[in-house]
Structures are given as C-alpha cells and as structure tokens.
Image: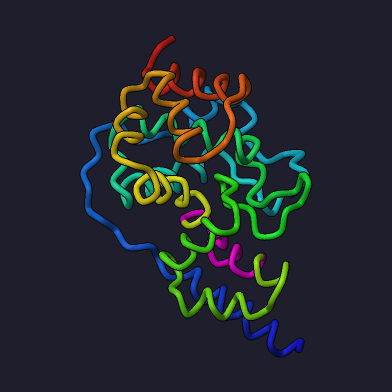
C-alpha cells in the first residue's frame, strides 16, 4: 500500500512540472503587479505568521501566477480580471490557503476553493483524465485529496483554476456582465456561475479590488 501511495505522489509531482497550454491571447489590460495586490490586501505582502506557511503565496508569487493564468485562458477585460482577483482573495484569505481547512472538506481547494466535482474537471484539463483516474483510485477522501493535488501542486495550477473556471464554466452573458465592472455583473457571476450566495464581505473585496485595479486613488 505504501508503495502504491508513493507511486501516486511521484506521478503527481511529475505532472506538476508540465505547464498548462498557452493560448496566445493578447492582454488588453496592464499586467497585475505585486504592489497592486498589496494595495488591495496589505497582508499579501508576506507570509509571516501564516497558519499554513506551505500553502501561503505572497503578492510577488501571486501576481506572477495570476498574470500567467490571464494569458493562458484569455482573460483580458479589466472587469473580469478584477472579479477573479477579488474572488480568489476572499476564498483563500488573501492567498494564505490553497485547500479548505474550515471545516476541512476533502478535495476542496486551489486559490478559488473549488468544490471537488469542479476540481476534478480542472485537474483533467491540466493533468489529463488518466492521471485523475489514477488519483481517484485511492478511494474516498484520499482520492479526492489526490485529485486536488493534481490541480494544486504549483502556483501556476493553483492560481490558474479561477481563470479556467470563468473561461470554461461561465456563460458568455455572465462573462460580459463581469467585464462591465458593475456590481450587478459581479453578483451574477457569484450566483449564476459560482453558485454561491451574496455576502457583504465578498462585495468589500470586489469594491477594493476594482478601485485599485482601475487606478483610482
């Protein structure tokens, strides 16, 4: 059994070395910088004091990975970019977590805290169906966590899921609404695509992110 688990983990690590495919879309927005992230959420400046330091990514790492995801999945409008940054900041507690700890749901994670069924779809897209099937063979919670590792094993993949999700799981009308930079579009993204409830705390993140990314003082 130990040999089987070790083999599975080694396979996951090998797959993490493979980059997600690039689409070649040109960006219509200025690249996200670490300083912009710090202005939005000051605690992204460092991982000092993080409860799970192995999961924490500071603003420098996050900006690099998010910019790559925007290019890979063709997220070019400022409204969509701001929405995804706000969504990830909220879900990961300012990039401190990459898996669910409260209450600790097996298989839930990445920087958007995707639920296991969606994590599986993303893992298939970045690691392949065979790798996911092999991970699921561990069974039960172990299988869910093994699939999450495929989707979550480096910054590129962990930060990439939100952009993948928007580009593949949301309707064109949801994307168009988010691109407007209006709160109605943000709310529609949360309810019609993510499938979560509206909350003032989420709006606080979105307002701050939109304000800073629009270059407003």
Residue drawn where x is 67% and y is 65% of the image: 145
Residue 149 falls inside the magenta stretch: yes
Residue drawn where x is 75% and y is 48% of the image: 101
Asked if 132 appears above or below 88 in the picture, the reply is below
**Which quadrant: the N terminus?**
bottom right
| In the foreground, 160 or 40 | 160
Is 69 situated left or right of 142 in this image?
A: left
- The picture quadrant where one finds residue 204 is top right
Q: Position of residue 196 (x, y in %)?
A: 57, 36
Q: How many numbered discs?
A: 0
Q: Position of residue 174 (x, y in %)?
A: 35, 34
| In the foreground, 213 or 130 | 130
Chief secondary structure of the magenta portion: helix
Q: Position of residue 129 (x, y in %)?
A: 45, 75
Asked if 118 appears above or below 41 in the picture, the reply is below
Residue drawn where x is 50% and y is 68% of the image: 16
Farthest residue toward the top?
Answer: 217
**Which quadrant: the C terminus?**
top left
Residue 213 falls inside the magenta stretch: no
Is 109 situated left or right of 164 in this image?
A: right
Asked if 16 appears above or below 110 in the picture, the reply is below
Is 163 situated left or right of 154 in this image?
A: left
The magenta region covers 145-156
């Amino acid at each position: 059994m130990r040999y089987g688990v070790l083999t599975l983990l080694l396979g996951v690590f090998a797959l993490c070395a493979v980059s997600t495919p690039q689409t070649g879309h040109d960006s219509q927005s200025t690249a996200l910088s670490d300083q912009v992230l710090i202005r939005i959420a000051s605690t992204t400046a460092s991982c000092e004091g993080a409860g799970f330091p192995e999961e924490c990514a500071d603003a420098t790492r996050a900006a690099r990975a998010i910019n790559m995801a925007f290019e890979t999945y063709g997220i070019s409008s400022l409204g969509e970019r701001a929405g995804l940054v706000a969504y990830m900041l909220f879900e990961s507690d300012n990039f401190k977590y990459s898996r669910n700890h409260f209450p600790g749901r097996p298989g839930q994670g990445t920087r958007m805290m995707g639920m296991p069924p969606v994590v599986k779809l993303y893992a298939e897209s970045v690691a392949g169906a065979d790798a996911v099937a092999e991970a699921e063979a561990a069974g039960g919670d172990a299988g869910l966590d093994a699939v999450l590792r495929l989707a979550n094993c480096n910054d590129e993949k962990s930060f990439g899921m939100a952009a993948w999700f928007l580009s593949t799981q949301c309707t064109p009308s949801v994307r168009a609404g988010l691109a407007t930079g209006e709160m109605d579009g943000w709310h529609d993204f949360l309810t019609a695509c993510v499938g979560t409830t509206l909350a003032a705390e989420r709006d606080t993140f979105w307002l701050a992110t939109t304000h800073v990314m629009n270059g407003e003082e």
